[in-house]
Structure formats: structure tokens, C-alpha cells
Amino acid sequence: MARKIILDLDTGIDDALALAYALGSPELDLIGVTGTYGNVLVDTGVRNALAILELFGRPDVPVFAGPPHASDRDGFEVLEISEFIHGTNGIGEAVLPEPTGQVQKEGAVDFLLRSVRDHGDDLVIVPTGPSTTIAAAVEADDTFAENVHIIMMGGALSVPGNVRPWAEANINQDPAATDLLFRRAHDVTMIGLDVTLQTLLTTEHTAKWRELGTPGGDFLADATDYYITAYETTAPHLGGCGLHDPLAVAVAVDPTLVDLFHTNLKVDTEGETRGRTIADETRLNDPVKTAHVALGVDAERFLGEFMTRLTRIAENT
Ligand code: BDR
Ligand code: CA
């Protein structure tokens, strides 16, 4: 039976690739997408998710909108660095038809709460943006934190941050939300920069999508080439772009892609190290470990899976 999955996306380019990975995985049953702010405003992210679902022939997947900003902030503006990496429209200025589908009336938090109640252990939630929405669900209902299974993209345990010396981009947007998640949720797998910066895509890969000559192939190639070009400026030492968000979805399909370190995590919420993900010293000797941090990845096997799955769905558009 396919594993039920919800993606919580700030649809950006690698979020779009994560969505495509889920759609290309018969092992997964995508029951919904929740949209958050981050790479883009929440409305832009929702629009991108709807447009991508339509492009790949899945307008049946419902999309829900989450809160538009962190709960300890009054608003949200897209950071310059996010715009540089993902473009002003979040998908590298690639052009997709305006979606015909609409965002759901039910809010993202209510959808998450209802889904965990209905599906329990059969469901995994994969947040690939700030933790604001999922933390709101944790706060709303104690049983959510006890029963939810999360595989999140965010954080960095053994490597520096990517937006500030200590902070990874998703955690940086709402450190208090991720801190709450780490302290309260019983099962969180962290797919951070430790592993995602080992999974790199180049224009040799995207050329294969362009050769397909399909709308899906063109979209994947256009958006990802924009992202690769940005990486040439922000992280030239890598020689490609980081496949952050798709790796989290891949781990939901196949946990053996990564090696996990089991611990209890917290996030620094103030001062110079604000946004740092680190082991919680007060729970160091607690025999129960609620966080599972990926520190190793079979990058070659993942890249093979990634290309196979995305090429397959792009062929059929
Ligand atoms: C994360 O930040 C966002 O820009 C990406 O979509 C990814 O989720 C990488 O640090
Ligand atoms: Ca993201």
C-alpha cells in the first residue's frame, strides 16, 4: 500500500522538484499540499503548487494555505537572497499557465490536524519550508505532536548555515517554530544541509529533461537551470545545485538513502547563533530520542532515483 504523504512547501524551485518527486513515486499517495511563506509569499507558493500539479496532470490533489508569516512577526517580505536563488515568481521566472484550480477553504493547520487524526502511522508530513504551519498544529492539539511522523528539510548539525553562519534558510525564517517542533514532536527526521549539499544537480542532468521536448521537461529544465546559475554565484565550490527538498521526499520513500544520528534537538532562538539547530543539552541523557538527523547519504543512488522519477513524469506531459 502506498504511504500517505502531505508536503508543506514554500514553492520555490527545489520545492517544485520535491513535489515532482512525490508525483513520480508510486510508493507515495500525495493526499494534499500545504503552502507556506519562505522562498515566496504564501499566495505565490500556493499558486505555484496548483500550477505544477496541473502541469503534471494531478489537479485532484488539494492545496491548503498556511499562515503568511511567523507568529512572532507582523508580516513577511521575501529576502533578497531567496529572490536571487528562486526568482521573483519562485520558479526561476519559468512561465506556467495560470492554474484553474483554487486553494481549499479549509486552512493548512486544520488539514494537518485532521489528517493525523484520520491516518496516524500511515501518514508522513514533509515540511520543506519554515516550520510555522506545523508548529501551529503542534500548539493546537497535544495528540498531534504524539502521533505525527515528520521528515523535514531544514537545519544543519555538522556544517555551517547557508543564510547566516549558524542558520539554514528554513530555520532562519522562524527559529521559535522549529524549536517548538523539536521539543514537542515525538518523531522528527531532519534532512539538513549536512546531506542535501552532497546531492548536486548540474546542467548535464537538466539537458536530459530539455531533450524530452515536453511542457513538463521544459519547465523542470528552465526552473532548475535558473537555480543552478544562482548556485554558481552563492556556492561555486559545489559545482551544482543542492537538491534539498527532493531529498526529504526521497527519504519518505526509502529511509535507507541516509544514515541517521539519533538525538534530541533544539534551536537557538536569540543572539548570534539564532537559527542554529543543535542537540538539547538538557535532554542529552534522555534514553528516548525524538530527532533523527541525517549525516550520511548515498548521493549516487538518490540522484539516479531522482532523475528516473522526474524524467518519467515529465515525459507524460
Ligand atoms: C531550503 O531553503 C529554501 O530556499 C529551499 O527551498 C530549501 O527548502 C534550503 O536551505
Ligand atoms: Ca523549500
Image: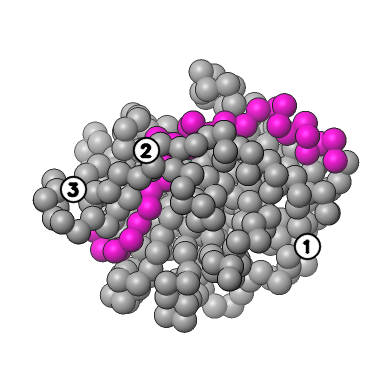
SS state under label 2: strand
Which of the 4 image quadrants contains residue 109?
Answer: bottom left
Q: Return the residue found at the far right.
A: 213
Query: Mark 3 or mark 2, which has the lower sequence index?
Result: 3
- Count residues near mark 2 (Cα–Cα under 10 Å), then give few for <14, some for 14-19, many for 20+: many
Judging by the rendered image, the residue that carries numbered circle 2 is: 295
**Any magenta on residue 189?**
yes
- Residue range highlighted in magenta: 183-212
Q: Amino acid at mark 3?
A: Asp
Query: Which x, y percent locates residue 27?
Result: 60, 61
Q: Image check: 93 left or right of 114?
A: right
Judging by the rendered image, the residue that carries numbered circle 1 is: 57
SS state under label 1: loop
Judging by the rendered image, the residue that carries numbered circle 3 is: 280
Between 225 and 310, the one nearer to me in the picture: 310
Q: CA distance from mark 1 to mark 3?
A: 44 Å
Query: Which x, y percent locates residue 170?
Result: 43, 46
Q: Are marks 3 and 2 in contact (CB under 8 Å)?
A: no
Q: Residue at x 51, y 18 (%)?
A: 237
Return the mark for residue 296.
none
Q: Residue at x 63, y 51 (%)?
A: 21
- Count residues near mark 3 (Cα–Cα under 10 Å), then give few for <14, some for 14-19, many for 20+: some
Q: Amino acid at mark 2?
A: Leu
SS state under label 3: loop
Q: Amino acid at mark 1?
A: Gly
Q: Residue at x 54, y 50 (%)?
A: 250
Query: Which x, y percent locates residue 284?
Result: 14, 48
Q: CA distance from mark 3 to mark 2?
A: 17 Å
Q: Are marks 1 and 3 in contact (CB under 8 Å)?
A: no
